[in-house]
Image: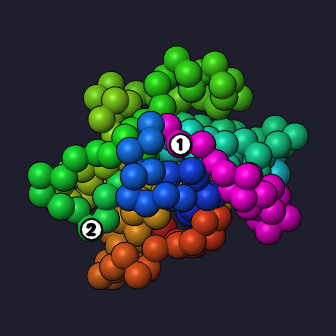
Amino acid sequence: MELIFIRHGQGEHTLNLPESLHMSNPPLTIQGKIQAKKLQSALPITFEDVLIVSPALRTLQTASIWSENMECNRVVHPLVGPRIFPTRLAATTLPCDELLDLERLHYEFPNFVLAPDLASSLWSSGINVLSEDEFNLLTEEFIGFCRSFQRERIYIVTHDGTITSYRQKISSQQLTREDFLQETEHFRLIVE
């Protein structure tokens, strides 16, 4: 199975650092929307494809624009929500990385379904500050979820720290923040 991780388009929380990190639910910028639109030709999707998306506004907007006019499977999953990389003890989640309220998610993104059978705490707290051990256990759960679709390819729209965390765990390579993807870049991982 091939997992294709895509970083979301440019978000407003990146424009005026560090103050902008305190924005709650930052949307895509105009540039971020253009980047998401370009995904349509860079990574064309079909009705058979599965998009798994972080429950953050900027990732949902990226996936919505990218999959516009395409009837594919769209699933929101907190196991691909924002994640601090590298993990830091006593770290806290910044407002820009809080998960979108489920009511707002349903209202603004009705074409997306929520991943089933998850602990309700994941929908509120996410994976941002979980320990490496906790994250590693959930990685196996997430890969099992991806396998349940029985598809050769799964697209995952998420965040730089989340992508790097999964890359490190799945590939067993030591990575750093230097390995972060740029906006709407993608990385392919083969999972046996």
Q: Residue at 34% x, 80% y: name it.
A: 175
Of 103 and 169, which appears nearest the observer?
A: 103
- Above or below — where is 64 with respect to 160? above
Which residue appears at 57% of the width and 50% of the height?
A: 12
Helix, strand or loop under label 2: loop
Q: Quick check: 61 left or right of 96?
A: right
> Is 61 part of what is drawn in magenta?
no
Quadrant of res 164 = bottom left
Whole-Å distance between the Cαs marked 2 and 1? 22 Å
Residue 114: mark: none
Please state which amino acid type lies under the numbered disc 2: Pro
Q: Residue at x 54, y 58 (%)?
A: 15
Work out whether 191 lies above or below 120. below
Quadrant where the N terminus sits is bottom right
Chief SS of the magenta region: helix
Amino acid under disc 1: Pro
Dot 1: element: loop
Residue 42, picture quadrant: bottom right
Q: Which residues are magenta?
A: 25-43
Q: How is the image coloured?
A: rainbow
Q: Dot 1 corresponds to which residue?
A: 26
Marked residue nearer the N-terminal end (2 or 1): 1
Q: Nearer the viewer, mark 2 or mark 1?
A: 1
Residue 144 lies, in percent from the top left, at 43, 49
Q: Look at the image and say whether residue 26 sits in the magenta stretch.
A: yes
The reply to whether residue 186 is visible in this rendering is no
Nearer to me, 107 or 73: 107
Q: Residue at x 58, y 53 (%)?
A: 11
Q: Is residue 62 visible?
A: yes
Q: Which percent across, then down, holds residue 131?
A: 18, 54
Disc 2 designates what residue?
86
Count residues near mark 1 (Cα–Cα under 10 Å), then give few for <14, some for 14-19, many for 20+: many
